[in-house]
Image (cartoon, rainbow, N blue to C red):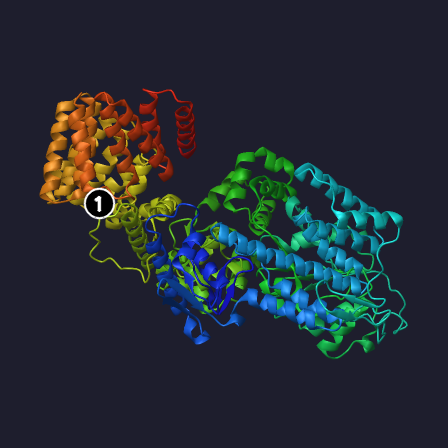
Amino acid sequence: MEFRLLGTVCVDTLTGPLPLGPAKRRSLLAALLLRANTPVSVARLTDCLWDDAPPLHARTVIQGHVSRLRALLTGADAETYGVELATLGDAYVLRVPETLLDSHRFEELLMLAREQRGPADSALMLKEALSLWEGPALTGTYPSAPLQAAAHALEESRLTTVEQLAHAYAVLGEHHRAAAVLRAEAVAHPMRESLAAALMTALHRSGRQSEALDWFHRTRRLLADELGIDPGRELADAYARILRGAPEPEPGTATAAVPGDGPVAVAPGATGAGASGTTGAGAPGGSGSGDPHPADLLPRAPRGFQGRAAELAALSRAAAGEAPVCLVTGPAGVGKTALALHWARRSPAAFPDGRLFADLRGFGDTGRPTSLEVLREFLLALGVPPRRVPESAQAAAALFRSLTDRRTLLVVLDNARDSAQVRPLLPGGTGCVTLVTSRHRLDGLIASDAARPVPLDVLEPPDGTALLAGVLGEERVLAEPVAARRLAELCGGLPLALRVTAARLAGRPHRTLAGTADELADERSRLTYLDVEDTGVSAALRLTVQQLPPDAVHHFSRLGHHPGNHFDPYTAAALAGSDPVVAAAALERLAAAHLVGETSPGRWVLHDLVRLYARGLDPAAGPDALLGVLDHCIATALAAADTAEPGGEPCFVLPDDYRRPAAVRDFTDRAEAMNWLATEREDLSLAAAAARTAGLDDRAWRIILLQWPHVVWRARDGWAPVLELALDAAAARSDPYAESRVRNLLGWVLSEEGRTTDAEMALAPSPGLARRAGDRLGEATALINLAIVHAEQGGPEEAMESCGRALALARQERDAHTEMLALQHLARMQLTAGRPQDALDSARTAFDLGPEHEEAARRVLLLAVSGEAHLALGSEGEGVRLLDLAAAEAERAGYDEGAVGSLEALLRVTSGAEYVRRYEQALRRLADAG
C-alpha cells in the first residue's frame, strides 16, 4: 500500500488504486495525509473541503466521507500495513507508517542527497527524489485555501530540488544536463528568476551563448509585460557576466556546494560517473574496427501513412531532451509501429551514428527475444567483431552503453511488453534517443527512466478516408465520399481495420465502398470482415488479451455486453458479478493494455471494435450480464433520486427477481446525485432501451422513471421520447401502477413544453389507473398534473378543484411531500385567479410542512408565488424582498428556470440594473444548457 500526494492524490494497492470517489473525499484524505499521525480537527477539515460558506450539514458530509474512506482502507487490508483511520473526539487521525507516504520519501531522499560527499551520488539521490512526482501536487482535490497553500509549498520544494540537481550537474561539468533539467521548469515557471538565471548560466557554459541571452530577453519582456518590473539582481548579474564573457568560476575546480548543503568534494578533471574513458573489447579504439558506416536496422518505411501531425510533433518535442526515452503507447492496431518508423525515417541527418531497431515481440506467438539476442544484433551493427561480443547479457549491456556513450543514434524498441524488457537495451549516450512502442503504458519505465509518453488514439474520419485513398487510389474514394467516410467510422478510426478493409477492396476492383460498408454495418459479422489471412483486428486483440490474468479477461468479456457507452467500477462489477474494488483493479489492468480508455477519472469507454471482440469471448454470458447491469442502474438511480429529493421517490417497489449489486455508489449531497443523473442520462436511456429489447420491461420503466429529479430540473430538455418508451414498457407489463406513474411524468413534461393537448391525452387515464393500483399518492400526482394542464387551457376553477382533491388524498396518506406539491401549484392557480390572499395562505401552509433545504426548486417556487402575492396585495417591499430571495436561492442551486421566473416578476415592478444583469445571465445559462 502506498499513499501519493505528489501528483493525483491516491492510494495504490497490490490490486490497483482505491476508488476514492468525489473530489471532496480525495481532499479529506489529502488533509489527513498532510498531517499524518496527527489529529486533524473537523474545523480544519471543513476549511480544506469548502471555501467561505460551508453547508450547514458539513460535519455530516465529513463523517460520511470518513466512513467511506475507512471502509475502502479496511477492504484493502490496510491494518496489515499499520494504517488506521481513527476518531479522536472532535478530530480524525490517519495513522500511517511514513515510509508509505511519497512526500515523506521525497524529503528523506533530499536529506540523503545533502549527506553525500560526491556530486554524482548527490545527483542520483536528487533524481530519485524527483522521480516520485507524477504531476502537480494534490491533483484531484478541491482548491481550498489550505490545500492550495500545501500544494504550493510542495511545488516550491520540488523546484528547489530541480535547482539543486542542476547545480550538482554543473559541479560535475555536465552543463548540457543542467540546462536540460532547468529548461523544462523555466518554461513551466517563466517568472521564477532564479530558474532563468541558472538556465542562462548553464547554457553559456555549454557554449550556447546566444540561447542564454535570448532567454534573458524573453524573461525581461515577460516581467515587464506581466508585472511591470525589471529583472532582479540575480538575473541581471547573470546577464552581465555572459555579456563580459566571464561567467562565475566553473564548479568542480575546487570545492563546490549544492545550494543550501555542505561541501561536495570533486576530483580535478572528473566528468561524472561512467566517463572514465576506459576502452574495452569493441569500444572505439579498442577493437581496431575504426568508425564503421552508420548502422541502419530500420525496416522499410510504412506505405500510406496518413495524419498524426500532432503525435509526430509530440515525438519531436520528447526527443529534444537529455538522453530521452520516448514511449508511444496505444491499443492493438492503432499504428504505433507505423508512427515510430515514419518519424524515425523523416530526419536521418539527426542521427549521424545510425539507427537501430528491434522487434521485442512482447505480444506475439513466437516468443520474445532475450536481451542478449537483441544486444548482440546491436553490437554487431555498431562494428563489434562477433568474437568480441560478451556472452552474458549484463556484460553486453555494459559494452553497448559504453559504445553509445559518445554517439548520436536512434534506438527503436518495438512492441515491448514491459519495462524490464526495455531497460537493458537503453543506450548510454546523452545524444541518443530511444523510441519504445507498446500496447501497455509501461508506467515503470516512466518512473525509472523519465520516459516521455506519446499516447496514440484512433484516426479522425478525414485521416481515415485519406488512408483508404492511399491504398485504393483517390479516384475510387472520391467517387464514393460518403461511403468512404462511413467505412472510416465503422472501422472506428483504427488503422489496422482500415488497412484490412482497403486490402479486401483492392482485391475486388468492381466492388463498391457502399456495399462493403453495408457488410460492416452488421455487428454480428463485422470482425469477420476485418480479418485477412493472418492479419486482422481479432488476431491483434487476441495477442493482447492472452497476456492478461484470468480475472481481467473475465471482466473484459463482460464489458462487451454493456448496453451503454461509459462505465465505472460499479458498472463493471455489476456486469462481471464482482465488487467495485476488484473491478477497479481489472479496469486498471485493461487500461494499461489499452483495451479500455479512461475519459475522465473513474469513467471508462470501449472502442466499438474492442467491444465486439469482448462480447464474442463469452456470448452466453450476455443475459446474465445485462440483468446485472440493469439492476445496478436501478439501485444507483434509486440512491441518486433519494439523495436529490429525500422522501420523494415515485418508484420504490423493486422487481420480484431483483438482484442487489455487491455495492451501490453513495451520494453525499444533492449536487453529486444530480451530476450523476445528468452525466449518465444517455447511458441510462441505452440501458432502458436494451431492457425493452430483451423483454425486461419491469426494468425499463423503472430505470427511466427513477431519473425524475433530473427530468423535473430540466423539464424542457427533450424527455418525451424516452418517457414514451417507458410508457410502452409499463403497458406491455399491464401494470397500472407503472403506467400511471409514467403518464404523470410524461404529461407534466408535455405541459412544460407547451403541448397541453398531448399532455391532457397522456394524463387523462392516470387517476383511474392509480386507483386500480391502490396508489393514492400516484392519483394525487395525476390530479395535480391535470390541474396544471387545465389551468393552462383557461379553466382555473376546474384546476383548483383538482388540486383540492389531490390535497385531500395527500393528507389522507399523511405524505407531506405530495401535500406541499399540491399546495405549491394551488397557490399559483389562486394567484392567477385573482385570489392573492388565498395564494399566500396556501404557500405559508406549504412552508409549515417543509420544504427541506435540499428541495431548492420547491423553496424557490413557493418564495416566488409568495412574493407575487404580496405585490398583488400592495406590499411591494415585502414582495420584492421575497422575489429577490427566490432568485438568489435559484442561482445558488443552479435552478435557472426558477431564477428566470423570479427575476421576470421582479422586473415587472422594478427596473434595477442589477436585476436586469442577473436576468440576462440566467437566460444565457438556460439557453446554453438547452
| Residue 820 falls left or right of residue 397 | left
Q: On screen, 260 above or below 700?
A: below
What x and y, as percent, mark residue 509? 59, 42
* Pick the front one: 100 or 724: 100
Query: Residue at image x 39%, y 55%?
Result: 561
Helix, strand or loop under label 1 = loop
Q: On screen, 502 above or below 272?
A: above
> Which picture quadrant has residue 666?
bottom left
The residue carrying mark 1 is 650
* Pick the front one: 575 or 238: 238
Count of picture labels: 1
Query: Residue at image x 67%, y 65%?
Result: 127
| Residue 431 falls left or right of residue 792 | right
| Residue 119 falls left or right of residue 338 | right
* Pick the front one: 26 or 353: 26
Query: Residue at image x 86%, y 47%?
Result: 243
> Which picture quadrant has residue 453?
bottom right
Question: In the picture, which quadrant includes the C terminus?
Answer: top left
Query: Residue at image x 13%, y 36%?
Result: 806
Residue 135 appears in the picture as rendered: no
What x and y, as percent, mark residue 323? 74, 60
What x and y, as percent, mark residue 113? 68, 69
Amino acid type of disc 1? Pro
For label 1, the crowd category at 10 Å Cα-Cα, with few meaning under 14, some 14 to 19 and many 20 or more, is many
Residue farthest to the bottom? 391
Residue 341 appears in the picture as rendered: yes
* Pick the front one: 88 or 377: 88
What x and y, as percent, mark residue 677? 35, 45
